[in-house]
Image (spheres, helix red, strand yellow):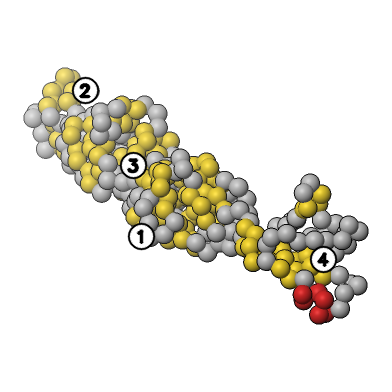
Amino acid sequence: YTAAARFAATACEHSAWESDSSLRCLAPGGVLGTLRVAVTAGARVGSLTDVVSYDTPSLAYIIDEQGNAFNATANLPSGGSVVTVLGAGLGVMSYTDSARTGQSRCEATEWQSDSSLTCKTARGTGGTEPVAITAGVRVGTVTEAVSYDAPTLDSITNNLDGEPQDVTGHANVAAVGGVEIVLYGESMALDSYTARSRVGQTGCEASKWASDTSLVCKTAGGVFGTLRVAVTAGARVGSVTEAVSYDVPMLGGGLNLTSDDMDADENATNATTFGRTNSPSTGSVSMTVVGSMFGESDYTGASRFGSTACEASG
């Protein structure tokens, strides 16, 4: 009796009556959730709710722009990469398919087939992120599918107009700090994601994101030797060892020898420029050493005569 069946509002591609108690239906494509099934026999209709559902999308591989396939974590630049997601259950046509990495939707999504979808990734600096695909009202996800490149450092210059210096030859900065250095590299993000940098264990006094390839750091004071530089962009950290050093202390200007046994005039006449300076063999003479790069605070500063340390330094 012109028997027919449908899933929700979509008729079966083909219906065939078999008996008074059975009907064969070639199911239509779909990506909706759980659906009712209705059977029509002549002018009579019978239906049952929540009978049929479609598989959720599943993800198997991610292919990057270079054609590399990943069944684990795919590593991406800061954003704008076109990746192909391979899986199943994406629909036999485009059902408003979309994809996202982490919490960010792809800048553009294009359905290819029931098993593939292309996604232009959004910018980001997060760690390892899940990928989710929506086909109709069905969502499929896979965890730890995509990560963004960590920042890398290639060269450093001491000022905005200076010539970049390869990080294999470290940059030198004043011990008092406050020197602007520009860090050049890659994957520092396409926008400012709380970009920060540090020299050794000390954060820069100020960090300013400039582009995906550069960051400006106003160095803090210090007196250590050659130190590593680290850049943080979002949740990703990149570092390079032996990149920056502080100026060594410099002696210049003069010495001033003072003693409790001398009056003010005698002490004043003992001020001398560097050359040969005499001190009593008994010691206990205060000497002021004039120079630069001794640090902007007390970094356990000490001095010595020959191989003998001063009785006190301050």
Give the CA separation, mark 2 to mark 4: 110 Å
Mark 2, mark 1: which one is toward the viewer?
Answer: 1
First along the sequence among labels 1 and 3: 3
First along the sequence among labels 2 and 4: 2
Nearest to the observer: residue 96 or residue 168: 168
Q: Which residue is mark 1?
A: 161
Vertical side of 244 occupied by 146: above or below: above
Please report contact status of discs 1 and 3: CB closer than 8 Å, yes or no: no
Residue 179 visible in the snapshot: yes
Task: Give coordinates of residue 59: x percent, y percent.
Answer: 33, 31
Say what secondary structure mark 3 lies in.
loop
Mark 2, mark 4: which one is toward the viewer?
Answer: 4
Q: Which residue is mark 3?
A: 77
Say what secondary structure mark 4 lies in.
strand
Which corner quadrant holds the N terminus? top left
Give the CA separation, mark 4 to mark 1: 44 Å
User: What's the residue at 40%, 47% (across, down)?
Assistant: 165
Q: Quadrant of residue 159?
A: bottom left
Labelled disc at residue 286: 4
